[in-house]
Amino acid sequence: WQRVDLPAAHHPLVMENAMIVKKFMKKNVIFIPLETTIGGAAAVVVRQHVGLLPVVDAAGKPVGVVRLGDLLELEMPDFIHLVDDFDFVHDCGAVESTRPPAGMLAKPVSTLMKPVLTVEEDSGLLRAYAIMLQNDIFDLPVTDEAGSLTGIISRVDIGSAILALWKTGGA
């Protein structure tokens, strides 16, 4: 036996009015090229107010992601990872005014980025949501059949689309 997976849009059980990622994703995607520095990535996050930056190669294909948490991790004091309960720490004092060294900010983003998970734009919303749940992520880059970045879908995008179909009994 050999398993053959059909793209979601071509699967015989998928109806034409199915709720697919392409219909609900954000199409104006903020991304960075692989050559970007860590400091450059941080500047894009600040300027664009985004929490996920897909990193793309010269062909526009996602090769990694930088999340806001990856950048903030550069600021976190080491002791945070050494204790299970840090409720006793009301502030981190002088540590909160430190910044990563210039040498760190000049490194290529490839030294910080994480592997990218994507979903094809013709996939169903619940498939995208399942990927997010399994991997504890909130945003997912979307690609076309060729693997090029075409959008981003979030848990909120998916939840809003599904909840909009619920029939309520009036408020």
Image (cartoon, rainbow, N blue to C red):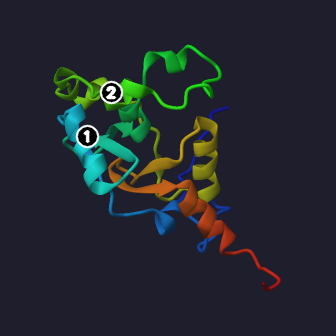
- Which amino acid type is shown beneath numbered disc 1? Ala
Query: 164 or 78, which lies in front?
Result: 78
Q: Is residue 107 left or right of residue 133?
A: left
Q: Position of residue 62 (x, y in %)?
A: 33, 41
Which residue lies most toward the right here? 169
Mark 1 surroundings: few (<14), some (14-19) or many (≥20) residues within 10 A: many
Mark 2 surroundings: few (<14), some (14-19) or many (≥20) residues within 10 A: some
Q: Considering the numbered disc 2 on the image, is that residue within a helix, a strand or a loop?
A: loop
Query: 3 or 147, which lies in front?
Result: 147
18 over 82 or under it: above or below: below
Which residue is tagged 1? 41
Look at the numbered discs 2 and 1 and tell me whether their residues touch, using CB distance below 8 Å.
yes
Give whichever of discs 2 and 1 has the lower sequence position. 1
Q: Considering the numbered disc 1 on the image, is that residue within a helix, a strand or a loop?
A: helix
93 over 29 or under it: above or below: above
Which residue is tagged 2? 112
Image quarter for residue 37? Answer: top left
Image quarter for residue 41? Answer: top left
Query: 33 or 104, which lies in front?
Result: 104
- Which amino acid type is shown beneath numbered disc 2? Leu
Q: Is residue 56 left or right of residue 95?
A: left
Question: Disc 2 versus disc 1: distance between alpha carbons?
Answer: 10 Å
